Image: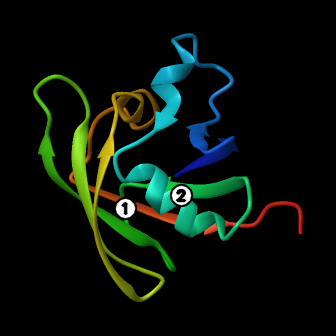
Amino acid sequence: MWLLKFCKEGNRWYVDLPEWTGRKSALLMVAGAHTLLELMADGKDEVNIYVDEENFEGAEHLTLIKKCWWNGADYRIETYENYYLYLKVWLCDVTKYVLGRFPKDIYFAKIEIGL
């Protein structure tokens, strides 16, 4: 299981990976990922989530639709917090950096830190 932090700068969401040595623009969440983060953030500028390839209690679910030939992969989330969503989410190659690959299923849950 991985703990990931996402931060909003202006109106853009970035995954916070201090060890990342590539371009910051590669950490930008776009094409559905930013929409999902807005839902998860509930008006805040930071979202912390646990991510795993195995299902766990309270997890939401992303399903791989297809790997893109140039980079990244398309995923689908059908529900979020028991509400119908059916959102396509594109995840870039940074996913491979974090998870090692584009798994068939990604499970995640928002957590509150520092309460």
Q: How many marks?
A: 2
Tag 1: amino acid: Glu
Q: Residue at x 65, y 46 (%)?
A: 5
> In front here: 81 or 41?
41
> 34 left or right of 16?
left
Q: Position of residue 8 (x, y in %)?
A: 67, 45
Quarter holding residue 30: top left
Q: Nearer the viewer, residue 69 or 58?
A: 69
Q: Residues within 10 Å of mark 2 (few under 14, many from 20)?
A: many
Q: Is residue 40 above or below residue 3?
A: below
- In the rendered image, which quarter contains the C terminus? bottom right
Comparing labels 2 and 1, the label whose residue is closer to the camera: 2
Q: Of helix, strand and loop, which one carries label 1?
A: loop
Q: What's the residue at 29%, 34% (across, down)?
A: 101
**Residue hosting label 1:** 54
- Residue 54: % across, % down: 37, 62
Whether 91 is drawn above or below 109: the answer is above
Identify residue type, mark 2. Answer: Leu
Residue on which disc 2 sits: 37
- Residue 25 location in percent, x, y? 50, 22
